[in-house]
Amino acid sequence: MLLDVKVHRGADVGSDHHLSVAKFLTKLKRFTKTEKALKIMVVKLQGGNTAEFFRQNLSYCFAVLEEDLGLEEKWELFKKAINQSAIEEVGH
């Protein structure tokens, strides 16, 4: 919404145009995040059999990626496999 407009005739800008100054009001939409990132406890992967179970689960999930799929479908499957394996084996 335009609040105020002023013209400064004496401004030296090197042309026959006049300098104009305007004040206006804008309303911005608030940005909201759609998904909240999961925090996974990667500390559990450092000891015990958890890391080995995680590797086995991932190797099983990556077998699905061998199919003839497009790049976007492969990325979605890859992301889903990593997140699902981490939640199952490590927890959040």
Image: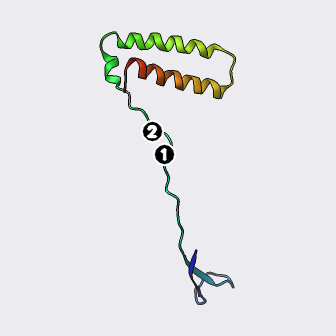
Front residue (pair 68, 19): 68
| Residue under the point 35% across and 18% down | 45
**Residue under pointer 2:** 36
Q: Is residue 23 left or right of residue 55?
A: right
Residue 34 placed where, x, y %? 51, 43
Residue at 45% over, 39% down: 36
Where the N terminus falls, by quadrant?
bottom right
Task: Name which residue lies at 55% across and 23% down.
Answer: 78
- Residue 53: which numbered mark, if any? none
**SS label for mark 2:** loop
Amino acid at pointer 1 = Lys
Query: Residue at coordinates 58% horizontally, 23% vertically from top-left?
Result: 77
User: SS class of the residue under badge 1?
Assistant: loop
Q: Residue furthest bottom?
A: 10
Label 1, on which residue? 33
Which image quarter is the C terminus in?
top left
Figure label count: 2
13 in relation to 90, above or below: below
Q: Are marks 2 and 1 in contact (CB under 8 Å)?
A: yes
Q: How is the image coloured?
A: rainbow
Q: Tell me how far mark 2 sits from mark 1, CA to CA.
A: 7 Å
Q: Write down the quadrant of residue 38 in the picture.
A: top left
Kind of residue sitting beneath label 2: Lys
Residue 24 drawn at (x, y percent)? 55, 75
